[in-house]
């Protein structure tokens, strides 16, 4: 093999190795930043991992909202009309957050089965519900009106 050809082959192999390593790093970072949506039924039947960030959507169970005295700690339950998941949140809730209304919470499911929310999202008008939550409720037999 000619020395020129050998250098060119070595450069191509090195470039492919660099591209492969960069692709692996990018895909790994992408995978660790994905946040999947799950229903309360999937959480209650232990179909989700307890060590990664996820979203749970459904309706806030009436009578489940409990606020700590003088603090920002809030506990409530999210349901898809089949199962409900207890949620704890430290912070200020959105103005439209209310019992019986649609919500999506993002956070981590604890080993004790309580969802530790880092973010709470609430619906913004009378007919809106996040598409994932609407689908989950429809699968559970609850009719949801979409605009």
Image (cartoon, rainbow, N blue to C red):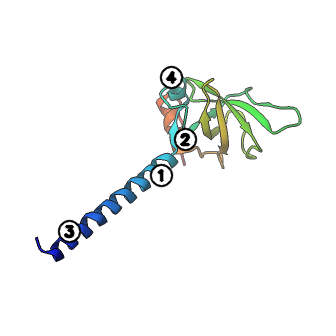
Residue farthest left in this picture:
1
Kind of element beneath mark 1: helix
In terms of depth relative to the viewer, which is nearer, 33 or 19?
19
Dot placed on the residue nearer the N-terminal end, 3 or 4: 3
To which residue does mark 1 refer? 29
Residue under the point 89% across and 36% down: 70
Kind of element beneath mark 4: loop
Dot placed on the residue nearer the N-terminal end, 1 or 4: 1
Residue 26 picture quarter: bottom left
Is residue 146 visible from the viewing direction of this image?
yes
To which residue does mark 4 refer? 45
Residues tagged 3 and 4 counted as in contact (Cβ below 8 A): no
Q: What is the x, y in percent for residue 79? A: 60, 29
Per the model, the C-alpha gap separating discs 3 and 1 is: 30 Å
Neighbor class of circle 3 (other Cα within 10 Å; few <14, some 14-19, many 20+) is few
Per the model, the C-alpha gap separating discs 2 and 4 is: 27 Å
Residue 89 picture quarter: top right
In terms of depth relative to the viewer, which is nearer, 78 or 87?
87
Kind of element beneath mark 2: loop
Q: What is the x, y in percent for residue 111? A: 60, 26
To which residue does mark 2 refer? 145
Q: What is the x, y in percent for residue 128? A: 59, 46
Residue 63 picture quarter: top right
**Vertical relation: 4 (above or below) 33:** below
Per the model, the C-alpha gap separating discs 2 and 1 is: 37 Å
Q: Nearer the viewer, mark 2 or mark 3?
A: 3
Residue under the point 63% across and 39% down: 102
Neighbor class of circle 1 (other Cα within 10 Å; few <14, some 14-19, many 20+) is few
- Please tell me the numbered disc located at residue 9: 3
**Vertical relation: 2 (above or below) 29:** below
Going by the image, does 14 lie left or right of 119?
Answer: left
In the picture, the quarter occupied by the N terminus is bottom left
């Amino acid at each position: 093999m000619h020395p020129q050809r050998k250098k060119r082959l070595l450069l191509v192999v090195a470039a492919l190795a660099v591209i492969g390593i960069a692709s692996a790093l990018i895909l790994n970072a992408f995978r660790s930043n994905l946040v999947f949506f799950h229903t309360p039924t999937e959480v209650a039947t232990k179909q989700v991992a307890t060590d990664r960030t996820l979203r749970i959507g459904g309706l806030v169970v009436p009578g489940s909202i409990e606020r700590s005295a003088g603090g920002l700690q809030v506990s409530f339950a999210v349901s898809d009309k089949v199962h409900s998941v207890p949620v704890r949140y430290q912070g200020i809730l959105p103005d439209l957050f209310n019992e019986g209304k649609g919500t999506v919470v993002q956070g981590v499911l604890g080993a004790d089965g309580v969802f530790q929310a880092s973010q709470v999202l609430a619906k913004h008008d009378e007919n809106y519900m996040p598409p994932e939550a609407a689908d989950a409720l429809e699968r559970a037999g609850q009719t949801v009106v979409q605009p």
